Image: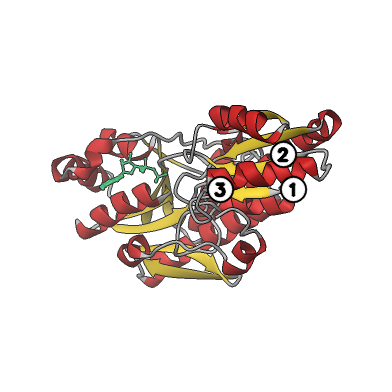
Amino acid sequence: MRIGVLTSGGDAPGMNATIRAVVRAAIASNDKIFGIFDGYRGLVEGKFQEFSRKDVSEILNKGGTILGTARLPEFKYETVRQLAVKQLQKNDIEALICIGGDGTYTGALRLHEMGIKTIGIPGTIDNDIASTDLTIGFSTALNTACEAIDKLRDTSSSHQRCSIIEVMGRYCGDLALYSGICCGAEYIITNDTGFDKQKLLEDLKQNRLAGRRHAIVVISEHLTDVYQLAKEVEQYSGYECRATILGYVQRGGAPTPEDRLLAARLGKYSVDLLHEGITGVCVGIRKNQVCYTPIEEALAMKRKPNEELFKLVQKIS
Ligand code: ADP
């Protein structure tokens, strides 16, 4: 086969490990494998390069993506996608492996409908894809968030402060949920827990009165203005309070062993599926087994938080 591989949407640690796994699996199956630069934009522009094993050496432990990623909102137009299909036909490429989040999956589904054999691999730090228990990049982002929260805890405790830490995950609270549990946060606030500000303020006041030296609040991005919330906590609870937005550091760094392992498994599995003639699907991991789901079905699935973990932390709702 002649297969293309691209990374698209927000970058995530482990994308390089995934590219490496796809390239090596394809070459081992006597396929020709082409790296496509800058996501769907590069696909439309014909930025293709045939890859050898050497082209993907020394990238396993590197963050980011050697293929680059870009956003091309115009890809939703069929006329633009036709340009992509033409580029693939010109290079005789029949199949495409797309690494990214649900936007990337939608692009892959539309291409599948136009006759291209596509497979989606979940590469996103948010863990927001319902068809898999874990996405590539989540473990590394969780690690980064935990390191930061641990450090903020040290200084919070010394200064008897409340620390509010905003982590990524706009539509999926997993980064806040998992990092909050791992770091012993007093409060975890996500889309799923809901946010009752008055209850939080009151609880913190009671904490303070009970003599607790510090408090950690972990909150998902975009739920509230955390700097304003810190001011209100100071006024109401008596704690000195600082807000920290972790931001884009969560996207970088060397992938954890968990992300590398997931990348290796899903990269190889994607190539195997293409050889079995299974396409228009996205791969994932459920109960520690690799699995695949039709992309259309995956996009319609609603992500729910892990119920058992969620029950651990229902303090503010
Ligand atoms: P992610 O894959 O991380 O969710 P985006 O939502 O930015 O990131 O999507 C990545 C790219 O996927 C977009 O820039 C666009 O090229 C493509 N894409 C997103 N939505 C669609 C759509 N409805 N139809 C076709 N392509 C899409």
Which residue in the structure is indicated by mark 1? 183
Q: Is residue 245 left or right of residue 148?
A: left
* Numbered mark located on residue 149 in the image: 2
Residue occupying image coordinates x 73% and y 32%: 239
**Mark 2 and mark 1: Cα distance apart in space:** 7 Å
Ligand 1 resides in the quarter of the picture at: top left
The reply to whether discs 3 and 1 touch (Cβ–Cβ < 8 Å) is no
Closer to the N terminus: mark 2 or mark 1?
2
**Mark 3 and mark 1: Cα distance apart in space:** 33 Å
Residue 295 pos. (x, y %):
34, 62
Where does the N terminus fall, quadrant-wise? bottom left
Residue 117 pos. (x, y %):
30, 59
Q: Is residue 44 left or right of residue 71?
A: left
Per the image, label 2 sits on a secondary structure element best described as: helix
Question: What type is the residue that disc 2 sits on?
Answer: Ile
Which residue in the structure is indicated by mark 3? 20
Closer to the N terminus: mark 3 or mark 2?
3
Question: What type is the residue that disc 1 sits on?
Answer: Cys
Query: Is residue 200 positioned above or below 38 on the image?
Result: below
The reply to whether discs 2 and 1 touch (Cβ–Cβ < 8 Å) is yes
Per the image, label 1 sits on a secondary structure element best described as: loop
Question: What type is the residue that disc 3 sits on?
Answer: Arg
